[in-house]
Image (spheres, helix red, strand yellow):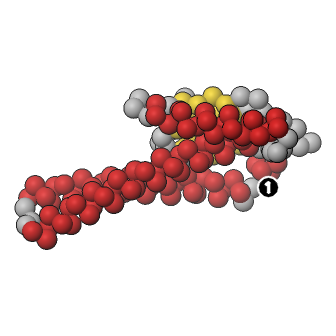
Amino acid sequence: ALQGITEPALLVRRGAVVLSLDPLNAIITAEKAFVMVPDGADDLLGPLLRRVEQAQAAKVAGTVRLPFEFIAMEALLVTVSTSQRHVVDRCVEDARRLLQVIRKRLSGELLNRIFALKKRLDEVYRAVRGAQEALEEVQGDEHALRLMYLTHPAG
């Protein structure tokens, strides 16, 4: 279902929020979050689960009063943005190394590496921009914002 979605999306439906933010996809209800992780992205699950567990512990302790759906959404958004930041940081490091080599010599192989890096940066930029647009779209829709309260649905 969600694995076929290529565009970043945040869909608010009665009783559920559906997120498709590369590399994670999730369906969040008032009590549970179902997260789909693509092959090779298992390292995102640990930080995601820790964030949810910390927020749930704070809720039990009475220091946080957020409904579960917002705890899950925040954990997912922080995990995705952190993951994308790491990808961008690696691209920046690759670009720095390439620029040092460019200064010394320019070859066809190097041009191919530059092109590959540009492609990676374009993909990351599209994912980040798409996630931003999906979030902004929901923020502009009062009905969708009301529907996000899954624990105590708006009447």
65 sits to left or right of 74: right
Q: Position of residue 43 (x, y in %)?
A: 46, 34
Query: Residue drawn 43% across and 51% down?
Result: 86
Query: Residue drawn 69% across and 53% down?
Result: 138
Query: Residue drawn 85% across and 41% down?
Result: 62
Query: What residue is shown with label 1?
Result: 142
Q: Front-most of 1 and 51?
A: 51
Q: Position of residue 50 (x, y in %)?
A: 61, 36
Q: Front-most of 57 and 21?
A: 57
Q: Is residue 11 visible?
A: no
22 sits to left or right of 96: right
Number of callouts in the render? 1
Spot the residue most to the bottom.
103
Mark 1 is surrounded, within 10 Å at the Cα level, by few (under 14), some (14 to 19) or many (20 or more) other residues, namely few
Name the residue type under label 1: Glu
Query: Residue drawn 78% across and 33% down?
Result: 30
Q: Position of residue 128 (x, y in %)?
A: 49, 55
Secondary structure state at the residue bearing disc 1: helix
Spot the residue most to the right.
155
Query: Residue 113 appears in which quarter of the rendering?
Result: bottom left
Q: Where the N terminus falls, by quadrant? A: top right
Q: Where the C terminus falls, by quadrant? A: top right
Q: Front-most of 147 and 101?
A: 101
53 sits to left or right of 63: left
Asked if 21 appears above or below 89 in the picture, the reply is above
Q: Position of residue 117 (x, y in %)?
A: 27, 55
57 sits to left or right of 97: right
Q: Front-most of 46 and 19?
A: 46
Asked if 124 appears above or below 37 in the picture, the reply is below
